[in-house]
Image (cartoon, helix red, strand yellow):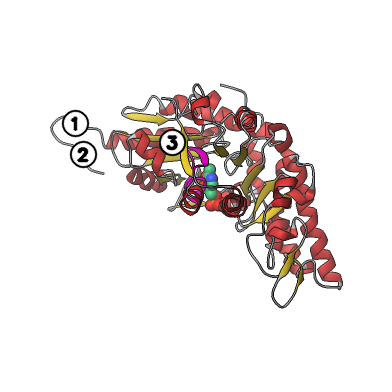
Amino acid sequence: MTASALLPESLRQDFPILAQHVHGDKPLVFLDNAASSQRPEAVIKAMVESYACDYANVHRGIHVLSERSTDAYELARSKVRAFLGAAYEHEIIFTSGTTAGINLVARSWGDANLRAGDEILLNLMEHHSNLVPWFQLAERTGAVVRHIPLTEDGRLDLYDLDEYLTPRTRIVAVTAVSNTLGTINPVRELARAAHDVGAVVLVDAAQSAPHLRTDVQELDVDFLALSGHKMCGPTGIGVLYGRAELLEAMPPMFGGGSMINRVYADRFTSADLPAKFEAGTPPIVGAIGLGAAIDYLEAIGLDRIHAHEQALVERAWEGLSQVEGIRLLGPRPELRAGLVSFVLDRPHAHDIAQLLDREGIAVRAGHHCTQPLHDHLGITASTRASFYLYNTVGEVDALIAAVRDVRDRFKPTGRKRRRA
Ligand code: PLP
């Protein structure tokens, strides 16, 4: 096992929600971080302080609170720029989350650039958020959706990429980390290949930005979307990074206040970036909370966080693979981020999650918004344990023991099956 680079036991003190017992005396073991992480006190405090001391609407008021609020909101943008390695602050658009960011690109860039017969290249491990907006775009434009195939162990199969990535491909939309398989995808390699045929690349960074260092210039991607709530930030705030020249050429998605330069009786002119894509009152305090979350993660270091999660995932993989009747989904630990999804021959994923919950262990069960992937794997649901910086080796061991126990309770006896 790789040595853990973090001391999660001390970090846990920063997360008040984790210090509780559930179902009586069970210490909470929170392993549902891929759905939404928890927030450290620093983030909660930054948001409370903003509401308590500095809050007013941004960009409009000529008064002290509006100036303070605007400064804090724009400071958050500059933190996101540095966090993502973007060249300019105006390439950072605040959205409500990854879903909103991808939809913005599909609507604004997609409608302006795609024609019937053009191709959109996806793959079956994508979250519904990175499928449905493209299906909708294809319906509107007559474009065609194609998929990069997957390998047996749940990676993108790039062997015959030339077959799928052609001069007709206009966009490649890919997740940096699969929320079900945990696979870390070779975004840089894909971006290079996509640019070679003149396609643009959108990266769904919902599951990567919280855990792995992200540099949009190094990756050479055109668009990247993330959600604050999965990276110690609040809900309702996300980011769309877009290359400046692409964003500049795109029409605004929503019309209203803030996104205009001038409105006449029958027409308008758009504001410059980033305001063009931030119509209406933005999620001001959410952005400030996200800025505080970035400060928190940067102080620890994304590389240390990733190394810690790798150690946890290796241990989980090793321990769970010993459980009778288990099928672990996705590639081996070195190729994945900090989550493990599995199926037991019995019981069903929902029953597993319910039984684990009784032991205080929070996991997710279902299709995780990856129904096409579950169809491809021949299953309807799986159970997912997802780790973050505050999870401990002890919690992973508790998960392994609890899963083993669940399977034991449902073990076929030959004559009669025991019921839970
Ligand atoms: N993409 C991936 C890979 C995800 O895991 C998720 C959320 O689970 C999303 C997109 C959607 O994120 P949000 O619901 O924050 O918009």
Identified at 46% across, 37% down, the residue is 146
Tell me the crowding category of disc 3: few under 14, some 14 to 19, or many 20 or more residues within 10 angstroms, Cα based.
many
The residue identified by callout 3 is 341
Question: Quick one: label 1 or label 2, which is nearer the N terminus?
Answer: 1
Observer-side mark, 3 or 1, equals: 3
- Residue 128 inside the magenta-drawn segment: yes
Tell me the crowding category of disc 2: few under 14, some 14 to 19, or many 20 or more residues within 10 angstroms, Cα based.
few
Q: CA distance from mark 2 to mark 3?
A: 25 Å
Which quadrant of the structure image shows residue 309? top right
The reply, left or right, for residue 15 in relation to residue 130 is right
The residue identified by callout 2 is 418
Q: CA distance from mark 3 to mark 1?
A: 26 Å
Vertical arrangement, residue 173 with respect to residue 279, above or below: above
User: x, y percentage for residue 36?
Assistant: 55, 49
Q: Which residues are magenta?
A: 117-133
Amino acid under label 2? Arg
Instruction: Tell which of 115 and 371 is nearer to you.
Output: 115
Question: Cβ–Cβ below 8 Å for labels 1 and 2?
Answer: yes
Instruction: Tell which of 296 and 268 is nearer to you.
Output: 268
Question: Quick one: label 3 or label 1, which is nearer the N terminus?
Answer: 3
The C terminus lies in which quarter of the figure? Answer: top left
Which quadrant of the structure image shows residue 412? top left
Q: Circle 1 sits in a helix, a strand or a loop, which is it?
A: loop
- Residue 193 inside the magenta-drawn segment: no
The residue identified by callout 1 is 413
Residue placed furthest toward the left: 415
User: x, y percentage for residue 46?
Assistant: 73, 58
Amino acid under label 1? Thr
Which quadrant of the structure image shows residue 283? bottom right
Identified at 52% across, 34% down, the residue is 394
